[in-house]
Amino acid sequence: METPDFVFKGIQNSPEHVKTAWQSPSNIAIVKYWGKIGDQIPANASLSLTLDACHTRTEVGYRKRESGEKQQINFFFEGKEAPEFGQKSFSFIQKIRGFQPFLQDYHLTIKTENSFPHSSGIASSASGMSALALCFMSLENELAGGYDDDFFFRKASFLARIGSGSASRSIYGKTAVWGEHHDFIQSSNLYAVPHRENVHPVFDSFNDVILLIHEGSKSVSSTAGHAALNHHPFAESRYREAGVNMGLLKNILTAGDVAAFGELAEREALMLHALMMAGPQPFILMKPNTLAVITAVQEFRKQTQTPVYFTLDAGANVHILFPDEVREKVLNFIEGELVVYCENKQYICDRVGNGPVKQQL
Ligand code: PMV
């Protein structure tokens, strides 16, 4: 499908009041998206595991606007009015107005909460933007008189991508791909697609324990990080390498090769941070404890032959990846050796999840 296919086609119903709510998860990329072309088109394809415990719950109330009335958008974060957070939703609504013009016809009350601590350094944009896009799609679904699931979720992913690239992947459970890649037949730069066929069951129950190394906001935003790739000496080789890794990962997922999966995840994570450090305006998002954890994980793996690996987002936190069969052993290792590196000893036990859930109201 192309961009014009996502323009809203016409109103069947015109309700005065509607309320919609979705819970949508975060995700962790194994092959990373880092660098974009134009408006939210990824410079390379990426593949992520959809998480479960880390999610955002968003509820949107729509009230028909009288002609001449200025549109009101009220935003509540964790029960409190939060206009500063609302700004992101507001600019998102502006960006998608060509695809959902009817949003302008309503006053909106947006209530949102995260399952993870706000200052944890966990990127909330993937779960937040996907939850909001799904809420807007539920309204659209009502106005349009009903869509099939394929189109509903594809357009939700298309809209979420406009809010935050990685959010496009949170629309689908387990594993999702965003960005065109010849090995993933249905893949698109405009929306994510689920990647479920030929994935070994070991990855359906994979664990991701997120060690919270550094609370507070990052010194350099993802937006600035993506932009740095526009004038980066290694951009082209990075995009090539990401393409190669996508092909490798597809085969690894089919084979259920946990060691190859973990090694690829670690290489991708380190390459992401190496790009940050080798750009025109270098920056470092890792903290000393990030490196301490990485070293400890690699050492533990070597000593005990346990399949435990790490990956990183664009931040200091470390995601510890491992299959279910070694869960107890790895949780003991984390409790015994890694919590000392976490801020306030905080970590979140997450795992692969089934994707967003519509909320009953
Ligand atoms: O979706 P953004 O613009 O926040 O970028 C996300 C970038 C990474 O998290 C570092 C990688 C990824 O693919 O999720």
Image (tube, grey):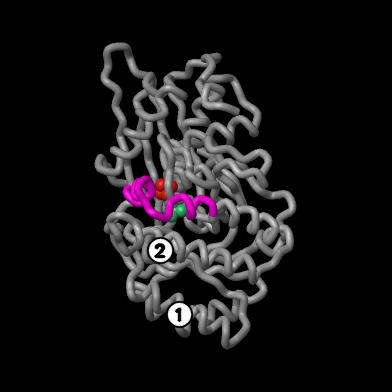
Label 2: how many Cα within 10 Å (few below 14, some 14–19, many 20+): some
Q: Nearer the viewer, residue 283 or 131?
A: 283
Magenta highlight on residue 235: yes
Say which amino acid is labelled 2.
Answer: Ala
> Considering only order in the chain, which callout, 2 or 1, is on the residue closer to the N terminus?
2
Q: Quadrant of residue 282?
A: bottom left
Of marks 1 and 2, the one in the foreground: 2
- Would residue 329 be visible to someone looking at this image? yes
The quarter of the picture where residue 91 lies is top left
- Up the image or down, 176 lies above or below 69; here it is below
**Residue ID for mark 1:** 295
The segment highlighted magenta reads 224-240
The number of callouts visible is: 2
Element carrying mark 2: helix
> From the viewer's perspective, is residue 185 above or below residue 346?
above
Q: Main secondary structure of the magenta part?
A: helix
Q: Which residue in the protein does label 2 denote?
A: 274
- Residue drawn at 50 percent across, 78 percent down: 297
